Amino acid sequence: MAKQPVYDAIVVGSGATGGWAAKELTEKGLRVIMLEAGRKLDPDKDYKMLAFPYDVKHRGVVPQTELYKDRQPTQSKCYACDEYGHHFFVDDKDNPYTTPKDKPFDWIRGRQVGGRTLMWGRQSYRLSDYEFKAASRDGFGEDWPISHAELAPYYERVERFAGISGSKENLPQLPDSVFLPPMALTCGEQLLKKAVEARWKDRKVIIGRVAMLTQNHNGRAACHYCGHCERGCNTKSYFSTPASTLPAAMATGKLTLRPDAVASHIIVDPKTGKAKGVAFVDRLTKKAHEVFGKVVVVCASTIESTRLLLNSASRQHPNGLGNSSDVLGRYLMDHTYSVSLGGTVPSVAKYPYVHEDGRNNGAYIPKYRNVWDKHSKFLRGYGIQASSQRGILPTHLQRVPGLGEQLKKMIRETPDAPNFWIGAFGEMLPRKENRVTINKAVKDAWGIPVAHIECTHSDNEREMAKDQLETMREMAIEAGWNIEWENPTLSPPGLCIHEVGTARMGNDPKTSVLNKFNQSWDVKNVFVTDGACFVSMGYQNPTLTMMAITVRACDYIAEEFRKGNL
């Protein structure tokens, strides 16, 4: 029997952080194998960015929660799990998890090469020291062991490679990135900007900062504004692992990609207590395999990474790998989500159509609570996303006369008012009781014990939600937007798909799982660089920070590897 190779590093997961780990480590000369639980996609068959309703069986008419209630009852709650893109999401029956009956958590997952970078929202914001050092400001929780200044060079490396479009604003609570040219605000959004900034000096309305190309960049084409990013992008115009980091890693000749590899546990050397490999089950054959490496970099996504570590319990690590502190699995967070309102913008109804529905982005209002003053009812704050766009199908479509060019002109140049939507994303406080454990009584389709998730909102989040609705309402009214509906209700945690925490970084091994370089305190050759490492949530979308942290950790891994310390 041939001797199995021993890789320099094993990367578990191929999403945003896994792709960056593979790129950085292979470019530094390490031989890497990447394990991905799902399949490798074929863009020509699996991406539906230019599909129309007549290309799908149910024409987009039947609600997706009805279509996929049998196999994807949780996944279909996500707007992108529809007829065009439901194959990017896991099968809930094969991939179960458990929660207390009174504490729902909507865990949205993607298993394929690229993970959720195929259908992510692409909003990309740096955290500031208002987030990294939040505990020093308000006394709740722990500070991160790093600052914005320490992470800034790594943010920049990610931004220069990935391509982030946006505008420089010089805001203390939202550091600027290295930007490609910004997208434009629509007419309705410009009304919002003018009204809000005139009345509230502490509020700013800017274009969203998004990982989509507004010009050709690093061999990838500029976005052509087809408007359906969540269906996959054949032109590679938004950042994803298959379009960006994976080709770079493959170009080194040092990456082995192993799709259909469902990781079950990290293998520990009983003599040293260090990790020596990863055990996995083939997704298709369900046969067990092992792969060996000198370093293990866990990038499976927040809850999956913690599930893997907890399932890696051994004689040396009885409570889970790297869990001597009993912190592993704790401090789970997700942004508050779904508090929103919408309607129409009558004052711009007669403006010409400018293809604004193809711009898959919107306006952004950075945090303004607990920045310059202290709110009396809640800690931390929230960001707001908004859009006002006229779509291709106006409300008067059934009354449109004509054929051919005349019909197209009438549909496009409708005198109807464009719709608007405005919604808030709030910071969830890190609380010890919000946690992930293992339910050994329930196993997935590959015989691996599942995650048990226990997570609820606190009074802090509920008070923040009240303020979100109130301030969004007053800004919409100030802009002359006509409010036609409101949603004051928070969705269960998870549905925002910004879950972080559960393997936090820190300066003290008694209160954290990882050190400031994402290295396990207990097992020095295991690193966790995805959202599990977050100490607190921040109000910003987390993926850009995850990627920057991964690049920083890989610099450290390569140097420690060179010194023989791993």
Image: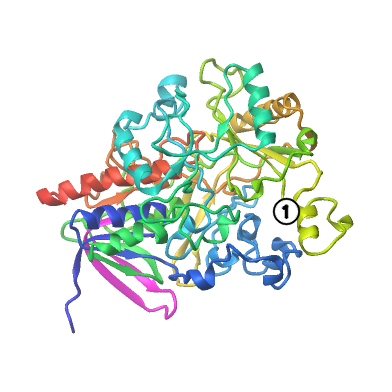
Rendering quarter of residue 291: bottom left
The secondary structure that dominates the magenta segment is strand
For the point 65% across and 56% down, the residue is 77
Q: Is residue 74 visible?
A: yes
Q: Residue furthest left?
A: 563
Graded by Cα atoms within 10 Å as few (under 14), some (14 to 19) or many (20 or more), the crowding at tag 1 reads some
Residue 39 percent coordinates (x, y): 44, 71
Residue 261 percent coordinates (x, y): 38, 70
Rendering quarter of residue 464: top right
* In the displayed structure image, the side of residue 342 where residue 243 appears, left or right: left
* In the displayed structure image, the side of residue 134 where residue 288 appears, left or right: left
Label 1 SS: loop
Q: Amino acid at mark 1?
A: Ile
For the point 47% across and 21% down, the residue is 138
Q: Quadrant of the N terminus?
A: bottom left
Residue 63 percent coordinates (x, y): 74, 61
Residue that numbered label 1 is attached to: 392
For the point 47% across and 54% down, the residue is 237
Q: Residue furthest bottom?
A: 1
Q: Nearer the viewer, residue 255 or 161?
A: 161
Number of numbered discs: 1
Instruction: Please say whether residue 287 is one of the residues in the magenta stretch.
Output: yes
- Above or below: residue 120 compared with residue 422: below
For the point 62% across and 60% down, the residue is 81
Instruction: Please say whether residue 450 is one of the residues in the magenta stretch.
Output: no
* In the displayed structure image, the side of residue 493 where residue 267 appears, left or right: left
Q: Is residue 327 visible?
A: no
- Above or below: residue 185 compared with residue 137: below
Rendering quarter of residue 307: bottom left
Residue 224 percent coordinates (x, y): 54, 54
Magenta extent: 276-296
